[in-house]
Image (tube, rainbow, N blue to C red):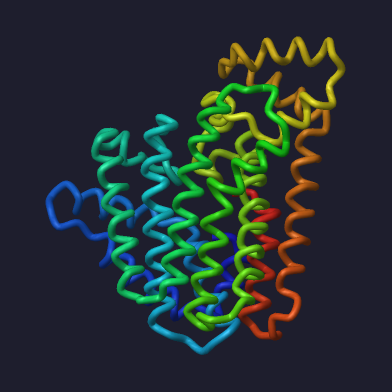
Amino acid sequence: MDARLKESLMPVRDSLAEFEVAFGNSIAGNSGLSGAIADHLVALRGKRLRPALVLLSHRSQSSEGPAAIKAAVAIELIHTATLLHDDVIDASDQRRGRISVNARWNNLAAVLMGDHLFARAFGVLVQLKNHRLLEAVSQAAKRMAVGELLQLQQSKNFELEESEYSEIIADKTASLFGAACQAGFLEARPDSPDVVKYQRFGETLGMSFQIVDDLLDYTGDANRTGKARGNDIREGKVTLPLIRALQTAGPAVRREMLKTVQGYSPDNFNRIHEFISEQGGFDYARRKASELKDQALEYLDGVPESPYRRSLEVVVDYAASRNA
């Protein structure tokens, strides 16, 4: 884990430890196959950004409470379910540097386990008896599905506009970040209208996070990111660096590059990378991620000064500048 991120999570270290136990219990299967997949998923542990956002948002408004742990578990169950489904959709054989569930078992096992985790997540949410929280997470889950469908619809659309790209990532990625921050806040102050600020904070953070993720697909070190470069273009995903480069290129260069990306093979990845760099696509994506970081921080105006607020600020900075 990045040293900045690890340090920023210290104020909720004990809560995250409780979360890990609760998450392990919630994800555990009750048969041979589901149990084996559950063990595999626990070993694939990620950065836990979304549960951390639940806990930090909660503690920025209230003292520690067990309900926030459960809300964090529900959010991470949904996130894990979407990763299982994503790997099937993208035909990915790696996840976080290790073999993916669909590659180790098969697509059917991955899809069914994802469905199982979705069901468990909403079972946890029902136990909390917080209607506003249940509604917020349900809306996020719906938006995530819509975002994935829109991304599929726009596959290999090299005329994609930046506004359309922003709509896709707002739904498929940023909506769950927003729900994570809402969840923490609503378990502290269930009747406060200020929850909207936390939702917008989380979503803006999530937009920045996804832009950097798309940038790393071109520029990242596979040893750090856990996946090979060029996956997005191979899968037909048109993301911000390429969108910007195609928009700024002259007509002749653009026509040439459209032929290259439309007939993509790993052999021409370096040429596409060079084109995006020459046209300023990477620099533009970095600037947009930084602008979104600044916007996210503005939503914390008025939040009382505390170690938890400061940690939220560090998480935003990490999301906008990470290299893995």
> Which x, y percent locates residue 4?
64, 66
Q: Give the residue drawn at x 45%, y 64%.
A: 135
Q: Is residue 194 left or right of residue 299?
A: left
Please state which of residues 47 and 308 is positioned toward the viewer in this rendering: 308
Please state which of residues 228 and 16 is positioned toward the viewer in this rendering: 16
What is the residue that sits farthest to the left in this orientation? 31
Q: Give the residue drawn at x 52%, y 63%.
A: 179
> Which x, y percent locates residue 141?
45, 53
Q: Give the residue drawn at x 50%, y 42%.
A: 146
Q: Is residue 275 above or below residue 5?
A: above
> Which x, y percent locates residue 277?
78, 30
How many numbered markers are drawn? Answer: 0
| Image quadrant in which you'd find residue 255 | top right
Q: Give the residue drawn at x 74%, y 67%.
A: 297
Please state which of residues 221 and 244 is positioned toward the viewer in this rendering: 244
What is the residue that sits farthest to the bottom in this orientation? 63
* Quarter of the figure that contains the N terminus: bottom right
Q: Is residue 311 left or right of residue 248?
A: left
> Which x, y percent locates residue 18?
37, 77
Please state which of residues 269 and 240 is positioned toward the viewer in this rendering: 240
Q: Is residue 274 above or below residue 127?
A: above
Q: Is residue 312 above or below residue 33?
A: below
